[in-house]
Each structure stands twice: as C-alpha cells, then as structure tokens.
Image: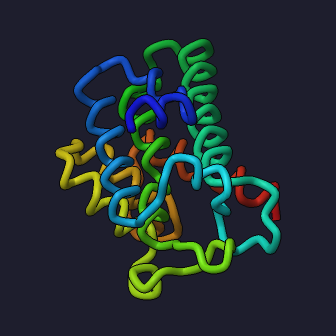
Amino acid sequence: MSKELLDLIPEFNLIKESGLREKCLQTWIEAMRRGGWKANDLNEMAFTLLIPDCPVNFVEHTRAVTLTCVAVADVFEKVYGDRNPVNRDQLTAGALLHDVGKLLEYTTMGGETVKSEFGARLRHPFGGVILAAEQGLPSEVLHMIAAHAREGDLVKRSREATILFHADFTSFETLK
C-alpha cells in the first residue's frame, strides 16, 4: 500500500525524516482501511462536497496544498533567511495529512462522494487528529491538522499551521 500511495502522492518523499514520513504514510493507510477506500478510489473522490461538480479530486487537492506550502517555505527561506524559520518536515507532514480525516468523513454511494455516518457527527479535522495521534505524530502536526479549517479560528496557529490554513483556503476559494 505504501508504494501505491507514494506513486499517487510523491510529495511524501519531501519529508526528510524517515520516521515522520512513515508515520504519515501509516496514517493514510489506516484512514483508507477504516474508510473502506482503495488507492485508485482517491482519484475519483471529490476533495470537497461544498463545491458542486468539483473539478479537483482528493489527491490533486492534497498535492496542490502540499506543494503550495513548500513553495511558501522556499520563498520565506530565500527572502527572510533564518528570521522566519519554517519546520519543513512538519509543514509537509501537516499539509499531507490536513484532509486525511475526509477518508472517514466521506464515503461513496452510487459512484458519488457523500457524507459518511462518521462524517455526519465529526468533521475531518477531528478524524484526522485522531488518526494521526494513533500513529504517534508530534503535537505540532496534530495542531496543523486541527487548525487548518475554521475549527482552528479559536486557537493561535503556529507559523506552519498559518501557512497550511492559507494554502488550503487558497485552493478551495479559487475553485468555488
């Protein structure tokens, strides 16, 4: 399963720390198992139910948000040097995992992505934090998953969580 995920989302390889990368992959694998998803399903899954006939799938959205976060980190490093340091591995992990809870929140019915029973009760930031915590991801990454959506408006977001929040909403808002 790891090979299939790496083929779909090569950005996992941007995480230099192998232990962190493996925990991210295991989080996805567990989410897919619990949600009943296969790797090839992820290219058919809508990344959001809030945009009718959404033109972007779950994998594309995850990759775009991750690459946007990495690009922001590149610019900050180039322009600010070490005056605004970004933990790239944690930022990349958070970006890759920000929507992993949607594998619990959504299901398919008649070939269409819809809310699952789990999703009727809990939104994806909660499911994502649960999944990632079970795999032993650090609190900094859990914070990014929890704070990437509007649920995070009541906490002080870390530098990395702020980058992720804006990358995710830039992707979402430009597709509406």
Which quadrant does the N terminus fall into? top left
Q: How is the image coloured?
A: rainbow
Figure check: 171 above or below 91: below
Location of residue 35 by image quarter: bottom left
Query: Percent x, y for residue 149?
Result: 51, 64
Figure check: 88 above or below 167: above
Q: State the residue in front, 118 or 69.
A: 118
Specify whether 23 is left or right of 73: left
Q: Is residue 166 visible?
A: no
Query: Percent x, y for residue 80?
Result: 55, 18
Q: Is residue 5 visible?
A: yes
Query: Percent x, y for residue 83?
Result: 45, 20
Q: Residue at x 26, y 63 (%)?
A: 130
Q: Residue at x 46, y 25 (%)?
A: 84
Q: State the residue in front, 123 or 27.
A: 27
Specify whether 170 is left or right of 131: right
Figure check: 77 above or below 115: above
Query: Percent x, y for residue 113?
Result: 63, 72
Q: Residue at x 42, y 43 (%)?
A: 94
Specify whether 172 is left or right of 67: right
Q: Residue at x 57, y 35 (%)?
A: 8
Which quadrant does the C terminus fall into? bottom right
Figure check: 114 above or below 83: below
Location of residue 129 by image quarter: bottom left
